[in-house]
Every structure is written in structure tokens, then in C-alpha cells.
Image (spheres, grey):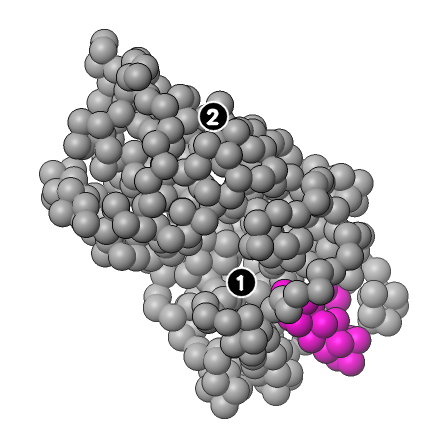
């Protein structure tokens, strides 16, 4: 904790001005919206304007140090930074260079602007525990040692902690998993993978089948609701107990897809069938015409199909045939006790997508009560 906070222990709880980097993503959009709902001044950075945002948008190229310094000059009153920006790259070295650069340029841009920065929230994912190679020890705990493999999350954390020590601000690192929520033009979104896949299958008269592997169908999994993560973000930036710490943030429960997919079928008015492994990245792009037909018929929000869903992302998550469980005890003990029933939340989110005309409405009939198809 910084000397500034030791002198003024109430300072972290006071509202200020928040800058959200990556505000166009599902995590950043929900964080920006939650801060705005709680009465903070909010600015969001994204590559393009965010539809319906109740906060100010900045168009800043965070990959460019000069552009970052220039673009962040108007954010000179920023007290809290929420960093959810991300750049995909093909190799671990390139991934680290790009994403550490994004964070460094943002921190340096705010420093050049003279921003009175008090707190930075940084997000990590399952890669921090080694989920990407195919297996990690569960339940994963924040105190688990780092892996020997190169990891851009480690490099970002090292930069952030060093900069915080030099410049006198606090930080908190949050580790969600399988974030579910909606944001326009953000294809790395498990909720949209399932919702669009199911909608297309229903339109084609097919039952709902789990398209991943049998191992993944039976493994324990967890998700993090984007709204819950946003509430954790505000807590992390305001509660002194979160300063300097790392917290796993999930809905707080675990499930098996075997339990949820029949419930999805029932809710969506579809027949249900046993899993059939199908690479979504191969099967779904060619069904773009089906989705466009649904958009036209139901007057759905006209998001480009390529921006709507990341099928490769869906394949990765739905083919992970190992238990994915993180302990959330540390966050609860520190004071963040929010939790959700994941099955209930999925169904609520489906209803929200229908109400907002993101996916077609469900039309239930007397024959649509989840009939099993062998």
C-alpha cells in the first residue's frame, strides 16, 4: 500500500474519475457502465465508439506511445484506471511485447498528463494458472506459484507493481474465468457462442447438441458474469483490503455442461440431443446466411457476423476436457461476497439478449418442452 494511503486511509473509498481501457470489450464495457451507475465520472477507451454508452468515449491508439500521451492529455483528472485492453498476437513473445506495451503506454500517458492516479485494476485469465497448455491444478489459488512458461500476464503484473511502487498508486489484479455477458462487436464471448449457435440450430430444425468434446461435457467448469466482475472491479478500486492483492473472481459455483445444456434447450424451446463434437470454426462461418436471415426476419441488431461470435474462442473453451475450478475464498474473506447461480444467470442473460433483439425471440409451443432426440 502506498504512503499516500497510509496518510489518508479513507482516500480509496472516495469517488473520482475512472478511465477504462478496452471499454469496447465485454469486461471493460460492463466495468464502465457499473462505475457510471455508481456516480463516478467515466471515460472509456476503445477502437470505435460504444453504442449506448452513458460515459465519454476516447479514441486513443494505446499501442503508440506518442499517440497515448497525446490522447490521454484530456484524462488528466484520472484517479482510477481499469485496464482491460488486449491485443492478440501469434507467439508468446509477441503477445507479451504487445500487451505490456499497451499497459506501459497507458500508465506513461496518464503520468505525462499529471493524472492523480490512486488505483489500477488489471485483469488476468486462466492463462495465469496454465489453462492454455491443457491442464492446471484445481482449485486454483492466488498463492499458487507461477509457471516456467513465458506468460504476458506475469510481465504485465511485474510492470504494474514496479510502476506503482515508483509513482505511489495502489493496484488490484482480478482473475475471472469464462466471462459471460454482452458487448457489441466483442466476439470473445462464451454467452454469444452458445446463443448464436443455438439460434442457428433451431432455425435449421436441429436439436441442441453440445459441440465440444465428451471430456469437456463432463468436466467441472466455472464462469464469471460480466456484471458481477464489474461490481468486483468497483470494490477493488475502493476498498483498502484489496490494495496490492490478487483475487479470483467467478460466480462462486461450478457446473458440468452435461447439466446445463438440457436446461438451455428447454429454455430456448428446442429438442435436445447427445453431444456431437463439431469444430465450430469449421461449421459455423458457412452458416452466416442463416444468421442474416434471422436478423432480417426478427429485426435484430445488425452486428456483422464476424464481430458477433469468435468460433475459435468457443472451440477452445468447449473442448477443454479438464476441471476448471478457482477458489474464491480469498475475495470473500476480503469483503467481496457477491455470487450467482450460473445456470440461472445463463437463462437470465438469454432473456436479456432476446429482449434487446440481439438473438431471435423464443416462441414456445406445447411440443417444445425439451424433447430428447437420440
The residue beneath circle 1 is 84
Answer above or below: position of 326 versus 303: above
Answer above or below: position of 218 versus 52: above
Residue at (24% x, 33% y) in the render:
201
Secondary structure at numbered mark 2: helix
Do the CB atoms of the residues marked 1 and 2 lie less than 8 Å apart? no
In the image, 32 versus 189, the foreground residue is 189
The quarter of the image holding the N terminus is: bottom right
Magenta-colored segment: predominant secondary structure:
helix
The residue beneath circle 2 is 258
Q: Position of residue 123 (x, y in %)?
A: 60, 59
Q: Position of residue 80 (x, y in %)?
A: 63, 66
Residue at (32% x, 45% y) in the render:
280
* Horizontal arrangement in the rendering, residue 137 relative to residue 199 (left or right): right
The quarter of the image holding the C terminus is: top left
Q: CA distance from mark 1 to mark 2?
A: 31 Å
Q: Earlier in the sequence, mark 1 or mark 2?
A: 1
Q: Which residues are magenta?
A: 153-172
In the image, 269 versus 316, the foreground residue is 316
Residue at (57% x, 49% y) in the render:
134
Amino acid at each position: 500500500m502506498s504512503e499516500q494511503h497510509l496518510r489518508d486511509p479513507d482516500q480509496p473509498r472516495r469517488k473520482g474519475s475512472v478511465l477504462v481501457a478496452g471499454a469496447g470489450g465485454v469486461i471493460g464495457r460492463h466495468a464502465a457502465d457499473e462505475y457510471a451507475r455508481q456516480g463516478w465520472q467515466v471515460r472509456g477507451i476503445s477502437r470505435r465508439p460504444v453504442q449506448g454508452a452513458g460515459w465519454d468515449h476516447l479514441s486513443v491508439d494505446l499501442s503508440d506511445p506518442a499517440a497515448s500521451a497525446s490522447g490521454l492529455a484530456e484524462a488528466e483528472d484520472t484517479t482510477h484506471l481499469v485496464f482491460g485492453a488486449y491485443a492478440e498476437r501469434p507467439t508468446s513473445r509477441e503477445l507479451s511485447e504487445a500487451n505490456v506495451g499497451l499497459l506501459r503506454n497507458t500508465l506513461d500517458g496518464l503520468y505525462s498528463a499529471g493524472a492523480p492516479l490512486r488505483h489500477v485494476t488489471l485483469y488476468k485469465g486462466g492463462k495465469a494458472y496454465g489453462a492454455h497448455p491443457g491442464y492446471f491444478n484445481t482449485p486454483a489459488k492466488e498463492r499458487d506459484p507461477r509457471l516456467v512458461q513465458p506468460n504476458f500476464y506475469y510481465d504485465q503484473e511485474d510492470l504494474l507493481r514496479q510502476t506503482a511502487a515508483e509513482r505511489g498508486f495502489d493496484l488490484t489484479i482480478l482473475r475471472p474465468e469464462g466471462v459471460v455477458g454482452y458487448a457489441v462487436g466483442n466476439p470473445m464471448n462464451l454467452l454469444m457462442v452458445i446463443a448464436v449457435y443455438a439460434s442457428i440450430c433451431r432455425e435449421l430444425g436441429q436439436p441442441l447438441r453440445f459441440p465440444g468434446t465428451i471430456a469437456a461435457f463432463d468436466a467441472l467448469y466455472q464462469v464469471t458474469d460480466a456484471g458481477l466482475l464489474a461490481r468486483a472491479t468497483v470494490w477493488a478500486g475502493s476498498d483498502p483490503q484489496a490494495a496490492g492483492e490478487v483475487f479470483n473472481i467467478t460466480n462462486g459455483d461450478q457446473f458440468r455442461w452435461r447439466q446445463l445444456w438440457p436446461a438451455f434447450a428447454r429454455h430456448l424451446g428446442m429438442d435436445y440431443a447427445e453431444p456431437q463434437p463439431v469444430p465450430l470454426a469449421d461449421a459455423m462461418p458457412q452458416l452466416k446466411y442463416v444468421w442474416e436471415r434471422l436478423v432480417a426476419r426478427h429485426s435484430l441488431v445488425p452486428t456483422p457476423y464476424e464481430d458477433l461470435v469468435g468460433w475459435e474462442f468457443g472451440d477452445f473453451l468447449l473442448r477443454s476436457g479438464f476441471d476448471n475450478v478457482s477458489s474464491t475464498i480469498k475475495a470473500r474473506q476480503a469483503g467481496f461476497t457477491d455470487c450467482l447461480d450460473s445456470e440461472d444467470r445463463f437463462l437470465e442473460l438469454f432473456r436479456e439478449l432476446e429482449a434487446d433483439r440481439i438473438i431471435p425471440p423464443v416462441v414456445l409451443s406445447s411440443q417444445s418442452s425439451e424433447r430428447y432426440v437420440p
